[in-house]
Image: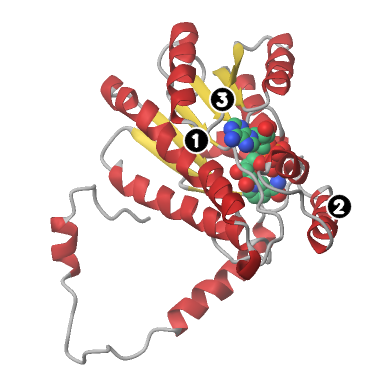
């Protein structure tokens, strides 16, 4: 996208942290911004802050895990601002600290609903109109460094962020050849309210004992993280540059390199010597865009 001035942006989880940082950067650059969040009072406060500095904004209550909510949000934005051309699927929650053998399935489902299923609902809601207007538009999905390396967080958080990463890569394939750009945001530690939000919103029993202690330690370490406004500015820069990967914390690069190297080291002889998969045939057979890599 050459510029965002005059475009209509929708940011989920826009009331706090990284989402608010994205909303601020987009508003400052002249976009109209719909701030969507499950926490409406906080979204309204965020919208009021942006409006006070001259931006055109609105706050919308949206639980990203409910597809009906998405439809209602879309109608509200369309009525006020017209078609959404910048879609930031950013709302996300942590997974606490449960180990696999005792992880509560209801918490697992919730983490995946917020961090992954919501992206599907978002696209089912907005992608048809984005395609129909047939002019540059943009989608940013928030994953994490935990979507590329298995950080020692909860197994649900890491799994859901790898899923958000895979979703974004597949979406880029699907949209290759269209005027709709895609980025995946992979921040490292950022000073936000995510631990608090997660504790407040999670279903089931509150974490106790080691889980509670870990949450408190995570809160302390995240408070030393990057400022969300800097992450928001990086998102704006990537939209303008049409850059798929949004990396904000280069200190993670050696970990990503080590992980990629381990994968490469895992390749050896074919399990069926002499066999060759028909990769070109696979590309031709696929109906969902081309295999896009730069
Ligand atoms: N903070 C970090 O260190 C960090 C690092 C990498 C990735 N991330 C990702 O960044 C994104 C934003 O998180 P943050 O750190 O800014 O946290 P945050 O808690 O400050 O902000 C997240 C916002 O999402 C909202 N939200 C939660 N569930 C929702 C739902 N069902 N529907 C709508 N809104 C909902 C919350 O109310 C909150 O306002 C998440 O996807 C998170 O996984 C965060």
Q: Residues within 10 Å of mark 1 (few under 14, many from 20)?
A: many
Nearer-N-terminus badge (3/2): 3
Ligand 1's quadrant is: top right
The quarter of the image holding the N terminus is: top left
Q: Left or right: where does residue 114 sit relative to residue 214? A: left
Disc 3 beta carbon < 8 A from ligand 1?
A: yes
Q: Residue at x 66, y 44 (%)?
A: 203
Asked if disc 3 and disc 2 are in contact, CB closer than 8 Å, the reply is no
Q: Residue at x 61, y 51 (%)?
A: 107
> Which of label 1 and label 3 is nearer to you?
3
Q: Residue at x 75, y 44 (%)?
A: 199
Frontmost residue, 249 versus 41: 41
Q: CA distance from mark 1 to mark 3?
A: 24 Å
Q: Residues within 10 Å of mark 2 (few under 14, many from 20)?
A: few
> Which of label 2 and label 1 is nearer to you?
2
Nearer-N-terminus badge (1/3): 3
Q: Residue 62: which disc?
A: 3
Q: Residue 220: which disc?
A: 2
């Amino acid at each position: 996208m050459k510029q965002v001035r005059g475009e209509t942006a929708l940011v989920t989880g826009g009331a706090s942290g990284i989402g608010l940082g994205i909303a601020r950067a987009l508003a400052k650059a002249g976009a109209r911004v719909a701030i969507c969040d499950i926490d409406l009072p906080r979204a309204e406060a965020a919208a009021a802050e942006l409006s006070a500095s001259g931006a055109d904004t609105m706050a919308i209550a949206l639980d990203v895990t409910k597809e009906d909510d998405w439809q209602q949000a879309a109608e509200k934005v369309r009525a006020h601002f017209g078609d959404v051309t910048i879609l930031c699927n950013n709302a996300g929650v942590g997974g606490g600290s449960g180990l696999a053998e005792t992880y509560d399935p209801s918490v697992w489902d919730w983490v995946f609903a917020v961090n992954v299923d919501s992206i599907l609902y978002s696209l089912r809601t907005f992608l048809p109109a984005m395609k129909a207007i047939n002019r540059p538009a943009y989608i940013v999905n928030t994953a994490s460094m935990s979507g590329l390396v298995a950080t020692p967080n909860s197994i649900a958080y890491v799994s859901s962020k790898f899923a958000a990463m895979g979703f974004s890569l597949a979406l880029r394939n699907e949209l290759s050849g269209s005027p709709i750009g895609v980025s995946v945001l992979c921040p490292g530690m950022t000073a936000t309210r995510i631990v608090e939000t997660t504790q407040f919103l999670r279903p089931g029993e509150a974490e106790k004992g080691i889980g509670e202690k870990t949450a408190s330690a995570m809160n302390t370490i995240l408070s030393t993280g990057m400022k969300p406004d800097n992450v928001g500015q990086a998102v704006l820069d990537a939209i303008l540059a049409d850059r798929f990967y949004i990396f904000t914390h280069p200190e993670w690069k050696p970990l990503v390199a080590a992980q990629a190297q381990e994968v490469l080291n895992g390749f050896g002889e074919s399990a069926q010597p002499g066999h060759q998969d028909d990769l070109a045939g696979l590309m031709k057979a696929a109906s969902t865009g081309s295999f896009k890599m730069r």
